[in-house]
Image: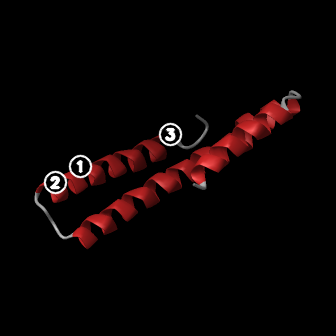
Amino acid sequence: MKADKKKMERLVKTARGQLDGILRMMEEDRYCIDISNQLLATQAILSRVNREVLAAHMESCMKEAIEAGRSEETIEELMAVLDKAMK
């Protein structure tokens, strides 16, 4: 992975902590809107991590693959990931 590994690990651990908190909120039968807000916050962190990982991929791995003549497969791979992300 070419993204800032320490930063990405910290963000994923934060999201994991938020998920643990969401589970506790559900077990405690907390207010639905509070749970939803925490879910949205967790999704935002994971989206940020994904954006940074994909940006680093495009700046390094994808660039190298294009220079090596593997542009078509590399673009198809990225498009497949983007299709998943946009659903």
Q: Residues within 10 Å of mark 2 (few under 14, many from 20)?
A: few
In contact (CB < 8 Å): disc 2 and disc 1: yes
Q: Which residue is mark 3?
A: 5
Left or right: residue 2 versus residue 11 is: right
Cα gap from disc 3 to disc 2, whole angstroms: 29 Å
Task: Look at the numbered disc 3 and give the secondary structure of its residue.
Answer: helix
Quarter of the view holding residue 24: bottom left
Q: Is residue 39 left or right of residue 72?
A: left
The residue positioned 51% from the left and 55% from the top of the image is 47
Residue corresponding to mark 1? 20
| Residue that badge 2 annotates | 24
Mark-to-mark CA distance, 2 and 1: 6 Å
Q: Amino acid at mark 1?
A: Asp
Q: Say whether residue 68 is left or right of residue 17.
A: right
35 versus 50 height, above or below? below
Amino acid type for the residue under numbered disc 2: Arg
Q: Position of residue 42 (x, y in %)?
A: 38, 57
